[in-house]
Image: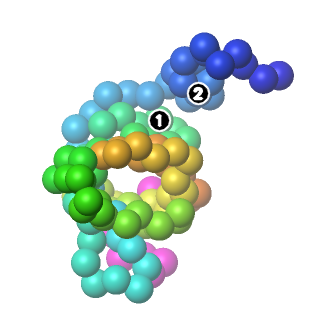
Amino acid sequence: MALPPSASLDNRRTAFRKPTRCLAYVQVPGSRRDIECVILDISASGARLKLSGGPAKPFQQGPTIPAAFRLYVQVDNTEIDCEVTWRKTDSIGVRFLSGFRPAGQNR
């Protein structure tokens, strides 16, 4: 069943999102440089990430986030595979493709 356009994104979520402020890094396949971000909220199925550095300035491109990537969470030294579900200027929504595991496994 399709929701009306006025339905908020919160009403379409299947899992409760818990607000948090955890430092994390988007690990881009084939790149040596990780992209710093903050996990703004998280659920069993996904998260909302704020990309560091804020929105890109006019005529300047922000960091390129691939459709799928590994997210490293610094506070507990874990990682999880993610897929981007939506994008905004300075944030993205992701769906988890795996469970959290100790960092360095499955690389």
**Residue 43 image point, x, y percent:** 47, 35
Tell me the quarter of the image containing the C terminus: bottom left
Secondary element under disc 1, as helix, strand or loop, is loop
Give whichever of discs 2 and 1 has the lower sequence position: 2
Q: Quadrant of residue 48?
A: top left
* Magenta stretch secondary structure, dominant: loop
Q: Quadrant of residue 29?
A: bottom left
Residue matched to label 1: 43
**Residue 56 image point, x, y percent:** 24, 53
What amino acid type should be assigned to the residue bearing mark 1? Ser
Q: How many marks?
A: 2
- Given residues 95 and 90, the one toward you in this image is 90
Residue matched to label 2: 13
Based on the picture, tell me whether residue 86 belongs to the magenta stretch: no
56 vs 2: above or below: below
* Residue 81 placement, left or right of 74: right
**Can I make out residue 32 in this image?**
yes
Query: Residue at 65% of width from left, 19% of height from top?
Result: 5
Give the class, few, some or many, for how many residues have Cα within 10 Å of label 2's Cα (few <14, many ≥20): few
* Residue 83 placement, left or right of 65: right
